[in-house]
Amino acid sequence: MREGVLERFEYYIGVLLQGAGITVSITIGALAIALVLGLGLAALKVSRIPLARPFVDCYVEVFRDVPPLTLLFIIYFGLTYVGIRLDPVPAAIIGLGLNGAAYCAEIFRAGFAALHHGQRAAAAAVGMTPSMAMRYVILPQAFRITLPPLGNYAIGLLKDTAVASAVAAPEIIWRARNLTSETFETPIIYLLVAALYFCLTFPLARWVNYLERKRRSWA
């Protein structure tokens, strides 16, 4: 009997770990899109390019107010009407990345706003162009300020990947749902799911706490 229980647990954990690999892949891909696009949007918002600020404001409001699940449905199902068919995992990465870019844009914008306006003037005084000032003066300081909130966003993103199960991305929740349909051992399986999410998010949360302490020591 004990061997049977252990075999079932090993099977459940093995299946869920396969889903965990997909969850981590979706998290990394979506985080990369969110960071790069969010930084670009924030830089546009603080620039003097005509119409850049209204464009960024529009993007942030639209993608921040639309639920991620709705966005995934639009990308995964809606794009088929124009001849674009994406697999579940790329669709989840793009959808969560576009949604996350709106939040990252606001995080980076707040980081830029926290810097004294004299930083740009000082950079210009020593002959730096606006792009050089952004690269060598503004960005390093803004990243130092925004690292903790970006870490918190990454934790939330990892948990939000659960919505990808709605478009059949084989991540943790999708695997758990299939296991419960197969075995009907719902409490055991979802307790394992909770433990697995904890094992994934706990190290990330410790890292965010470390960054918080580090930032206080820099101040």
Image (tube, helix red, strand yellow):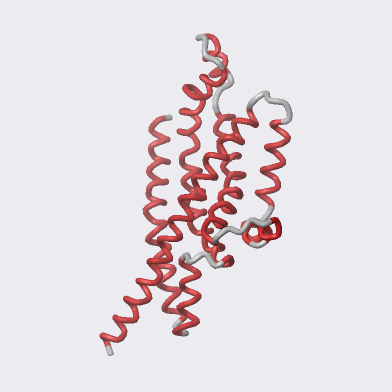
Q: Residue at x 37, y 53 (%)?
A: 203
Q: Residue at x 28, y 90 (%)?
A: 1
Is residue 61 found left or right of 90 in the rendered image?
A: right
**Residue 124 in the image: x percent, y percent?**
55, 12
**Residue 103 in the image: x percent, y percent?**
59, 45
Question: Residue pushed farthest left?
Answer: 3
* Res 34 quadrant in image: top right
Q: Residue at x 38, y 47 (%)?
A: 207
Q: Observer-nearest residue: 9 or 166?
A: 166
Task: Please tell me whether residue 111 is drawn above or below residue 150 in the rendered image.
Answer: above
**Residue 141 in the image: x percent, y percent?**
47, 28
* Res 10 quadrant in image: bottom left
Is residue 98 found left or right of 54 in the rendered image?
A: left
Task: Please tell me whether residue 191 is drawn above or below residue 66 in the rendered image.
Answer: below
Task: Please tell me whether residue 12 is drawn above or below residue 139 in the rendered image.
Answer: below
**Residue 163 in the image: x percent, y percent?**
56, 63
